[in-house]
Amino acid sequence: MTNPLSDRINSLPVSQTLAMAAKARELRAEGKDIIGLSLGEPDFNTPDFIKDAAIEAINQNYNSYTPVDGYAELKEAICTKFKRDNDLVYTPNQIVVSTGAKQSIANIAQVLLNPGDEVILPTPYWVSYSAITTLCEATYVEIPSSIDTDFKITPAQLEAAITPKTKMIFFNSPNNPSGTIYSEAEYRALAAVLEKHPQIYILSDEIYEHINYDAKPFSFAAIESMYDRTITVNGLAKAFAMTGWRIGYIGAPQWIAKACNKMQGQITSGANCIAQRAAITAVLAPVNKIQYMVDEFKTRRNIVIGLLKEIDGFKVNVPEGAFYVFPDISDFFGKTIDGVKIENASDFSLFLLEKANVATVTGDAFGSPNCIRLSYAASELQIREAIKRIKEALN
C-alpha cells in the first residue's frame, strides 16, 4: 500500500539547489573534502549594526506575536527605502512583510493564480518560480534565452509567448542564476508589449538589487504604466547577509497587499519579531554600509571568470550582479570523461561533485539545460581550489 499523499505534493519537484547541498553534506559526512559552490548564501556575517539592533529589541522585550503584515515602523521604513533606492512611492497599506521573499512570492501566486492560468518565466529563472506556479495549479511557460544574449529575452519573444490564459510574468533582475541585469531601456521595451495585455500582472523579484557591479538595476514598477500591475518583491537575505533571519517584503497595489495579508494570516501570521526590529535598521541604513561585501563579490566574480575561461569547453559571460556565474558547458555533452558519459548538465554537475569534489547546480533546475550554476559566495581560497579541481578532473 502506497502512502496516500496528495496530488499537490506528488506533483512538486524537490529543489535542486537544496538537493545538491544535501548531497554535498552526505559526502562530507563520509569524509570527503567537498567545496560547496551550490548555495546562494553570502559567506559574510550579518553586519554588527544590524545585530546590535536585534540585541536591543531583545532587551526591550519584543517577544509577542507581530501584526500579520509587519510592524508599522518597518513598513514605514520599507516605504522610505523604496522611494530612496527605486523612486517608487508606496504607502504602508501596500506593504506586506513575510518570512522571507520566498513566502512573499508564494503569497502573490496564491492570491492571483487560478487553475489553468499561465505564468511566463523567462529563462533562466529561480528554481522555486516553477514549483510555486505548479502548487497553484497553474502552468508555466518558459521563454528561452542563452549566454549569447546575456540570458535576456526580447520583446518579440515575450509577445509570442502571451496567450489568452497568460495571467502573470516573473522578472528577476539581478537574476539568479545568471547575474543578468535588465537595463531601464530593456525593461521599457518589454513593458511596451505588456501594455497591450492589461490582464497580465508582473512580479518583479529584486532581492539582489544591491549586489550590482557595472549596472544599476531598474525597478519594473517605476514604469508608470506598469505600477498598478506590478508587485515588487525584496528582502534582506542577500545584500545584508541575513539569510537565516527570514525577512522578505512586497510593495503592491493595495488590493493585492490586502489579499496577501489575508493569505499569510492563515499560513504563518507575522514574521519574527526580533528580525523585524533589526530589519528597520537594515533598510534605513545607507547602502554604502554594505558596500564592502559588494566589492568583495566583484573581486571574486572577476577571479572566477578569469579561471573558468582557462578551461576548454566552458563558455562564460560577465554577469553584472548577484553572486553567480552560469557558464554554458554543452560542449561536454556526448563526451566520456574519466569513464563517465556526459549526456546533459545534470550529468556534468554530478561528475564535478563525484570526481572533483565540487558542488554546483545543474542548469536544468533553472530552465537552462546547457548551463551549470556556480556560486562565488565563498572565500577566494575555496574558489581557486574548486576551479583547480574542476580543471584537473576535466583534463
Image (spheres, helix red, strand yellow):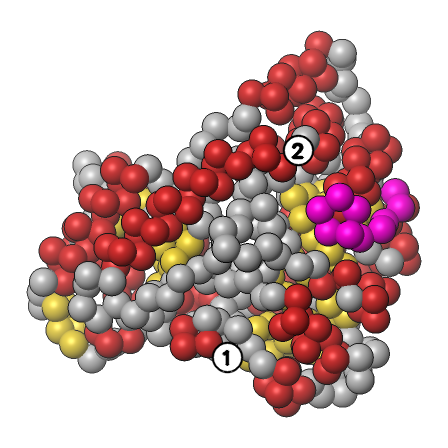
**Magenta stretch contains residue 331:** no
Per the rendered image, the range of residues in magenta is: 83-92
Q: Are marks 1 and 2 in contact (CB under 8 Å)?
A: no
Residue placed most toward the observer, 321 or 73: 321
Residue shown at 85% from the left, 49% from the top: 90
Mark 2 nearby-residue class (10 Å; few <14, some 14–19, many ≥20): few
Identify the residue under disc 2: 286
Residue type marked 1:
Pro
Identify the residue under disc 1: 144
Residue 70 % position (x, y):
80, 36
**Magenta stretch contains residue 91:** yes
Above or below, 21 against 282 in this view is below
Residue 221 % position (x, y):
76, 61
Q: Earlier in the sequence, mark 1 or mark 2?
A: 1
Residue 72 % position (x, y):
86, 33
Query: CA–CA distance between discs 1 and 2?
Result: 37 Å
Residue shown at 17% from the left, 51% from the top: 389
Residue shown at 42% from the left, 54% from the top: 324
Question: In what element is the residue under mark 2?
Answer: loop
Residue 336 horizontal side relative to residue 144, left or right = left
**Residue at the top extreme, as displayed:** 59
Give the mark count. 2
The image quadrant where one finds the C terminus is bottom left
Dividing the picture into quadrants, the one containing residue 9 is bottom right
Residue 62 % position (x, y):
76, 18
Q: Is residue 70 visible?
A: no
Residue type marked 2:
Pro
Above or below, 5 against 47 in this view is below
Q: Is residue 194 visible?
A: yes
Question: In what element is the residue under mark 1?
Answer: loop
